[in-house]
Amino acid sequence: MALPHELQQELQTELVRKSIHMLIALVPGIAALVGVQFTLALLAAGTLFYTYCEVLRMQGYSVALISQLTTVASRQREIGRFTLGPITLGLGAMIALLLYPDPAASIAIYALAFGDGLASLFGKFFGRLTVPATGGKTIEGSMACFVAVFLTVYALTGRSLEAGIIASAAALLELFPTSDLDNLLLPTGTGLVAALLFV
């Protein structure tokens, strides 16, 4: 069965968007290789560079690759507007690195990358049961967030009870109707729970 063109376009946009989003999962590995301070500097530089490119795009200028990626990955509601998602994504990873020691910082960043990313994809592709007062978020998306975070935490720590608690917190935080601010809320809240359990 063929999908309507609009839905096909929306799903394609979400796939591109969340593929880029999940690249933030590289941050803990980079921090382990080159140190937290240098990783923070890289994230800050990348966030500032993207912000500058986005300001230029809003003024009608195109910055090679960045403007095209932003346009391809923008949701319908973001077309013609400043796209905040990549900025809050970078800030969310920086907050996790600044506030929490490992493994809490890594858990927070992986929750942001995989929990939020897969919640959105599963919600768009398979979501049928909408959760009231969440801005259209779905049970299926929340379940995907829970499973992704549970598996990630368990893979990092080997502790299933703690993985379940952290995954539950992530799934609940992901339900808040915060738009792109979930990129700040999810790693901050998930990292706090992880820090309380592992530090």
Image: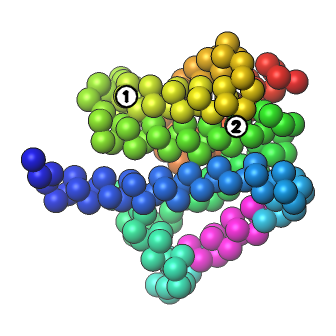
- To which quarter of the image does residue 111 belong? top right
- To which quarter of the image does residue 96 belong? top right
Foreground residue, 39 or 130? 39
Please indicate, yes or no, whether residue 112 appears anywhere in the rendered image: yes
Is 103 rendered above or below residue 131?
below
Residue tagged 1: 140
Foreground residue, 30 or 137? 30
Find out whether residue 41 is within the magenta segment.
no
The residue type indicated by label 1 comes to: Glu
Please indicate, yes or no, whether residue 181 appears anywhere in the rendered image: no
Distance from Cα at disc 2 to Cα at disc 1: 21 Å
Category of crowding for the residue at label 1, using alpha-carbon neighbours closer than 10 angstroms: few (below 14), some (14–19), many (at least 20): many
Residue 144 position, x and y percent, is 45, 31
Magenta residue span: 43-54
Foreground residue, 55 or 13? 13
Q: Residue 13 vs residue 190: left or right?
A: left
Image quarter hosting the C terminus: top right
Residue 15 position, x and y percent, is 39, 55
Residue that appears at 66% across and 26% down: 154
Category of crowding for the residue at label 2, using alpha-carbon neighbours closer than 10 angstroms: few (below 14), some (14–19), many (at least 20): many
Q: Secondary structure at mark 1?
A: helix
Residue tagged 2: 108
Q: Secondary structure at mark 2?
A: helix
The residue type indicated by label 2 comes to: Ala
Q: Going by the picture, which residue comes out furthest to the left?
A: 1
